[in-house]
Image: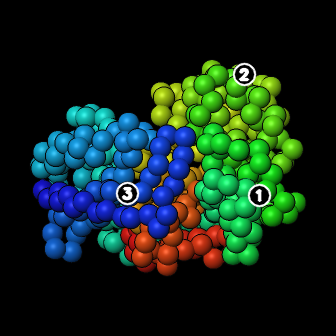
């Protein structure tokens, strides 16, 4: 029978991040260890972000305690799929299931001596292209951030919008980054109606944007925006709604380890989104190192099956003391080569 252990881990952001859903200064996740024996174990991470996804750390901890009782009689040879299904049947909470899924993948990698990406597909990419995030709230700061990203080798940046002077900041990013820089904007559903979203997207369109992430919330609202938008539309938070990723309502779908229920859920939702004609890419909600590693492994597997836009996984350098962990080099993160996740 496996033993489940929880340990809270807290990260401090080097600078506060302001978004449409609030300001982030600290990040707390739960590190989860599933142990069958001294050498037979796996480590995962639960990373809900209540101001963003409405899921509390307490709710996730409670679900994980339920999962411990579900797993109590599990043998060392019981399948990953069966263990995950048993937990989901008892309490379906993707942010908690993600921790179990990651621990099981990490364990599988340790047992076989292989990185998780190689377990997902033998054709996994060796590195994953990622975007930089420009969080400055003023034009000069945005321009400085974009120029720094280009110097560091990033070919794509994401700009938070819905927080004031959006058109001015995005124009400053375009001017500083040059015509070859891919720019993606993220509204986090800041605009209340399709009409409001379209008015803002028309103002931003001259900057030649790759995608506008989650300009509004809801499948039908996103579909309405996409029909008339001068900017391709990507789904983010709405992906939590049943059937949303397979709706074909947007040009692209942003997938997240926590929201999808782990690596297994990301790959499942990617298949559904691609079947509906949408591009997919992987991002994080400022996850810890294990969550980012899981995202990189999943993205490397997805890249083997088709084109993958830059992923939003270059976020660990926002945490004090973690700039060297899974760091982006020339706009990409190398897939970890050690057995397991990280």
Q: Which residue is mark 1?
A: 173
Q: Tell me the SS state at disc 2.
A: helix
**Separation of marks 2 and 1 at Cα, in angstroms:** 25 Å
Helix, strand or loop status at disc 1? helix
- Residue at label 3? 27
Snapshot quadrant of residue 220: top right
Query: Which one is in front, 74 or 259?
Result: 259
Q: Which residue is mark 2?
A: 195
Residue 321's disc number: none
Q: Nearer the viewer, residue 174 or 234?
A: 174
Q: Residue at x 61, y 42 (%)?
A: 163
Q: Quadrant of the N terminus?
A: bottom left
Q: Is residue 276 above or below residue 83?
A: above
Q: Is residue 55 above or below residue 243?
A: below
Q: Residue at x 79, y 41 (%)?
A: 204
Is residue 158 at all visible to an observer of this figure? no
Q: Dot 3: few (<14), some (14–19), or many (≥20) neighbours within 10 Å?
A: some
Residue 283 placement, left or right of 249: left
**Residue 34, quarter of the rendered image:** bottom left
Q: Report the number of numbered marks.
A: 3
Q: Is residue 148 left or right of residue 103?
A: right
Q: Is residue 106 visible?
A: yes
In the image, is 231 to the left or to the right of 324?
Answer: right
Q: Residues within 10 Å of mark 1 (few under 14, many from 20)?
A: many
Q: Nearer the viewer, residue 7 or 299?
A: 7
Between discs 2 and 1, the one toward the N terminus? 1
């Amino acid at each position: 029978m496996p033993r489940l252990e929880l340990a809270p881990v807290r990260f401090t952001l080097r600078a506060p991040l302001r978004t449409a859903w609030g300001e982030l200064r600290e990040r707390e996740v739960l590190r989860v260890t599933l142990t069958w024996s001294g050498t037979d174990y796996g480590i995962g991470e639960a990373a809900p972000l209540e101001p963003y996804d409405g899921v509390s750390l307490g709710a996730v901890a409670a679900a994980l305690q339920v999962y411990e009782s579900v797993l109590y009689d599990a043998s060392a040879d019981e399948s990953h799929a069966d263990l995950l299904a048993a937990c989901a049947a008892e309490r379906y909470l993707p942010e908690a299931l993600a921790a179990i899924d990651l621990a099981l993948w990490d364990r599988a990698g340790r047992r076989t001596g292989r990185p998780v990406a190689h377990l997902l597909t033998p054709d996994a990419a060796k590195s994953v292209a990622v975007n930089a995030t420009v969080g400055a709230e003023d034009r000069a700061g945005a321009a400085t951030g974009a120029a720094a990203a280009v110097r560091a080798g990033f070919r794509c940046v994401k700009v938070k919008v819905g927080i004031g002077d959006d058109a001015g900041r995005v124009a400053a990013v375009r001017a500083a980054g040059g015509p070859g820089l891919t720019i993606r904007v993220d509204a986090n559903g800041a605009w209340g109606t399709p009409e409001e979203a379209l008015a803002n997207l028309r103002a931003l369109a001259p900057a030649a944007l790759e995608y506008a992430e989650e300009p509004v919330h809801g499948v039908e609202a996103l579909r309405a925006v996409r029909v008339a938008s001068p900017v391709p539309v990507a789904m983010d938070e709405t992906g939590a709604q049943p059937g949303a990723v397979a709706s074909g309502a947007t040009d692209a779908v942003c997938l997240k380890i926590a929201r999808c229920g782990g690596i297994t859920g990301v790959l499942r939702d990617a298949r559904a989104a691609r079947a509906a004609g949408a591009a997919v890419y992987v991002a994080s909600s400022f996850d810890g190192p294990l969550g980012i590693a899981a995202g990189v492994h999943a993205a490397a597997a997805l890249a083997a099956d088709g084109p993958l836009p830059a992923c939003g996984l270059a976020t660990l350098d926002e945490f004090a003391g973690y700039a060297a962990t899974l760091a982006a080099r020339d706009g990409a993160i190398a897939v970890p080569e050690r057995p397991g996740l990280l």
